[in-house]
Image (cartoon, rainbow, N blue to C red):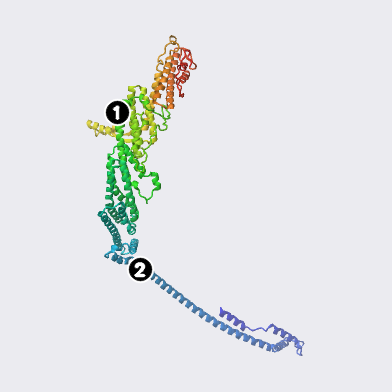
């Protein structure tokens, strides 16, 4: 481009230059100024002359302007040469710059290559450094094997377990093991892992050996001092506990090293023991064995002393109170000492159970030989109220840092409860189920005059009897006093033979209520419910049997009222015991199957398919039998039955004179159909109130029964009146069902009901015995009330 531009400039400069405008103007002016000579234009006559004149003129003009043109030409030539020099200089400069640019590009390319080479060297250096660091880090887990092996296998290695360096070495071994387990792809990882595991086992074994040897040294020292001389309680306590507490912090610190490595397996379904758990178990077992050699003989000796003491040798409750309190104190001391030597309480309660075994050995035979239910109840109450917690409170206040003594005493409580249930069943069998009534037990109603049988409010009908408040408030056994007060006088008041409030009750009822009040809340609720249903069932049968004997001896009403009053008492008493419904016992009866197969076998048709299919629904399958014993339902049923029998019996007796067949009333005296019945009712109502007063003291109960008898009498009269009106209608003598009717006829039902209300006087507590007032309510010959 630069060369083309230079060529164009040279071509422009070679073209003939035109004179400048100023020179052209000057030439024109000079031409105009040339004077006309002889050879002027006027002398030109032809073209030749003109041409000659023109050339002459032109030459003269050129000569005139030659100097100026020459000067201009010189200037132009000088400018041209200057411009050519500039162009040459520019071209050379451009060439130099082009060369410099090419040199710079070459240097730039070389610099880039050098930079890349340097970066490659730096990355290689960094990679090599990291590789060297990784190799060094990996090698440190392998290099630790030799120094650890030399240290753990050196003589006297067990003496170094208490130092901080030993703990650091264990931590280092754990890190090496973790590394080997997380890098199984390395060539020697499995070999080194097994070796490190052996070293860790060796280190923990050294800890166990040192721990056990330290305890054994203390044991030897203590046992030697105990054997040398008799010691008092303070010195004995200092030897048994203070000596063990001296080195307890250091032993606990090294024992934790074993415990924190006794981790359970990740997969619980494997059933494998936690790693190094056996070492921890050996630690606990050795400690328990060493402490047991010191504590258990002392516990046996002190329990023998307690058992031989005059105050506790024959009294089960006193012995249990003293021995359990002593053993509990020992367990609390051992609990505290265990916490100073171990972190956590795993294995502690197994050790404490061995300490409690002498207590069980003393208590269990005494419990099995104890026949008095009162003593068993007192012992059971003592264990529950003093050493056991309520389940709801236990769930809220459970603290792992406190001794759970109720779990240790639970076997003794179970033994007492088992024995109590056994004695209760024996008492039920001997004193209630097999009870033979004495003549004085059946002396009713005179026996009622010895004591008042009071029945509280209750609703009586033919369908439902609603129990009211408890008749006699039999309090529960009181808690044993903490100061050990003799409770022999308190026990006497629980003897059912001495309770004056229960004298009027039938013996089996009195014993049943006493037994229920004794075992209530002392045994498992399910066991109590089952036993309570049996007690109520057998008591109901006993009362029913006694009522039958009383009915045969005296009168049926006496037997019915005896059974009614005692069943009401029983029903109201068991409300306080919260007896739950007993689930039915389901069993299978295979007697039909056995008999069917014997029958087929005898007939020789055992393998006949037709006979087998025919007998599928006739005894080949076992029958499901439900033995459901719900004493509450049974009691309600018997109570309804006896109440209905009593009501129907008295109502039938009052209306016995009502005729069954009807004759012409014109041959009868006036009022002969209704008058005997009315007289009979007037006679029986006082007798009804008298017999109710002999058995019941509750006025509402008596009035309810009297009202029920009245309703039944009216119902029976209504049946009689219906038959009477039907008979009269058949004779052509219709009888109006409203109004009093003729004097010699019977009353309608409403009239008879109004009259009965005046006779029965239901709801009126005071009975008027005045003959005049009684006669005023009797039946007049006019049929008025």
Q: Is residue 675 left or right of residue 294?
A: right
> Is 739 above or below relative to 612?
above
Query: Mark 2: which secondary structure?
Result: helix
Which quadrant does the N terminus fall into? bottom right
Observer able to see residue 511: no
Which numbered mark, 2 or 1, is in the foreground of this view?
1
The residue carrying mark 2 is: 136
Q: Residue 210, image x and y in percent?
A: 29, 60
Q: Nearer the viewer, residue 657 or 535?
A: 535
Near mark 2 (Cα within 10 A), the count class, few <14, some 14-19 or many ≥20, is: few
Q: Nearer the viewer, residue 564 or 489?
A: 489
Earlier in the chain: of badge 2 and badge 1, it is: 2
Q: Residue 329, image x and y in percent?
A: 33, 49
Residue found at the far bottom of this picture: 38
Q: Quadrant of residue 28?
A: bottom right
Q: Quadrant of residue 12?
A: bottom right
Q: Residue 573, image x and y in percent?
A: 38, 33
The residue carrying mark 1 is: 436
> Is 624 above or below relative to 166?
above
């Amino acid at each position: 481009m630069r060369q083309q531009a230079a060529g164009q400039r040279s071509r422009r400069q070679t073209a003939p230059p035109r004179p400048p405008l100023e020179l052209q103007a000057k030439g024109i002016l000079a031409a105009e100024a040339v004077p006309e000579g002889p050879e002027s234009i006027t002398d030109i006559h032809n073209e030749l002359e003109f041409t000659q004149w023109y050339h002459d003129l032109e030459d003269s003009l050129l000569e005139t302007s030659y100097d100026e043109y020459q000067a201009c030409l010189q200037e132009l030539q000088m400018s041209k040469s200057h411009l050519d020099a500039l162009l040459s200089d520019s071209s050379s400069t451009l060439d130099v710059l082009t060369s410099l640019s090419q040199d710079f590009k070459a240097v730039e390319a070389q610099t880039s290559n050098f930079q890349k080479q340097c970066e490659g060297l730096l990355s290689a250096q960094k990679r090599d450094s990291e590789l060297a660091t990784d190799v060094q880090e990996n090698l440190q887990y392998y290099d630790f094997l030799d120094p650890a092996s030399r240290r753990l296998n050196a003589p006297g290695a067990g003496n170094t377990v208490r130092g901080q360096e030993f703990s650091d070495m264990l931590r280092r071994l754990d890190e090496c093991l973790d590394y080997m387990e997380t890098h199984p792809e390395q060539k020697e990882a499995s070999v080194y892992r097994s070796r490190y595991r052996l070293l860790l086992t060796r280190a923990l074994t050294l800890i166990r050996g040192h721990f056990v040897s330290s305890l054994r040294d203390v044991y030897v020292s203590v046992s030697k001092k105990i054997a040398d001389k008799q010691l008092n309680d303070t010195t004995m306590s200092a030897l048994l506990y203070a000596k063990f507490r001296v080195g307890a912090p250091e032993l606990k610190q090294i024992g934790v090293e074993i415990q924190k490595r006794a981790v359970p397996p990740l997969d619980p379904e494997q059933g494998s023991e936690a790693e190094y758990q056996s070492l921890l178990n050996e630690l606990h077992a050795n400690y328990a064995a060493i402490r047991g050699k010191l504590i258990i003989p002392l516990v046996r000796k002190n329990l023998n002393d307690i058992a031989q003491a005059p105050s506790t040798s024959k009294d089960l409750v006193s012995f249990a109170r003293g021995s359990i309190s002593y053993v509990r104190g020992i367990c609390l001391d051992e609990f505290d000492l265990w916490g100073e030597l171990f972190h956590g309480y795993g294995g502690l309660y197994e050790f404490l159970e061995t300490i409690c075994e002498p207590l069980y050995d003393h208590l269990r035979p005494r419990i099995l030989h104890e026949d008095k239910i009162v003593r068993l109840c007192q012992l059971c109450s003592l264990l529950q109220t003093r050493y056991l917690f309520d389940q709801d409170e236990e769930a809220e206040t459970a603290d792992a840092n406190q001794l759970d003594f109720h779990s240790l005493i639970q076997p003794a409580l179970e033994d007492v409860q088992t024995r109590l249930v056994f004695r209760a069943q024996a008492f039920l069998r001997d004193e209630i189920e097999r009870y033979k009534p004495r003549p004085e037990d059946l002396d009713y109603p005179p026996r009622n005059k010895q004591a008042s049988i009071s029945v509280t409010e209750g609703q009586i009908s033919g369908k439902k009897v609603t129990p009211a408040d408890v008749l006699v408030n039999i309090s529960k056994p009181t808690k044993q006093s903490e100061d050990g007060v003799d409770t022999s006088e308190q026990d006497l008041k629980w003897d059912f033979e001495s309770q004056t409030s229960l004298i009027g009750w039938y013996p089996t009822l009195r014993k049943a209520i006493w037994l229920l009040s004794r075992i209530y809340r002392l045994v498992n609720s399910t066991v109590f419910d089952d036993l309570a249903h049996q007690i109520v069932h057998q008591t109901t049968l006993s009362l029913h049997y006694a009522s039958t004997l009383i009915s045969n001896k005296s009168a049926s009403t006496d037997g019915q009222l005896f059974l009614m009053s005692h069943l009401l008492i029983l029903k109201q008493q068991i409300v306080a015991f919260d007896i739950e419904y007993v689930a039915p016992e389901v069993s299978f009866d295979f007697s039909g199957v056995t008999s069917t197969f014997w029958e087929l076998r005898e007939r020789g048709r055992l393998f006949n398919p037709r006979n087998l299919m025919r007998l599928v629904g006739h005894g080949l399958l076992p029958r499901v039998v439900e033995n459901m014993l719900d004493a509450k339902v049974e009691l309600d049923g018997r109570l309804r039955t006896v109440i209905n029998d009593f009501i129907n019996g008295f109502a039938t007796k009052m209306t016995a004179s009502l005729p069954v067949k009807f004759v012409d009333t014109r041959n009868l005296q006036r009022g002969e159909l209704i008058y005997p019945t009315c007289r009979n009712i007037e006679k029986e109502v006082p007798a009804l109130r008298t017999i109710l007063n002999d058995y019941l003291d509750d006025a509402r109960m008596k009035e309810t029964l009297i009202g029920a008898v009245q309703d039944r009498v009216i119902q029976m009269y209504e049946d009689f009146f219906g038959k009477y009106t039907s008979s009269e209608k058949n004779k052509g003598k219709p009888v109006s069902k409203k109004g009093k009717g003729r004097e010699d006829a019977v009353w309608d039902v409403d009239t008879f009901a109004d009259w009965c209300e005046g006779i029965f006087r239901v709801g009126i507590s005071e009975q008027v015995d005045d003959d005049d007032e009684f006669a005023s309510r009797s039946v007049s010959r006019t049929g008025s009330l």
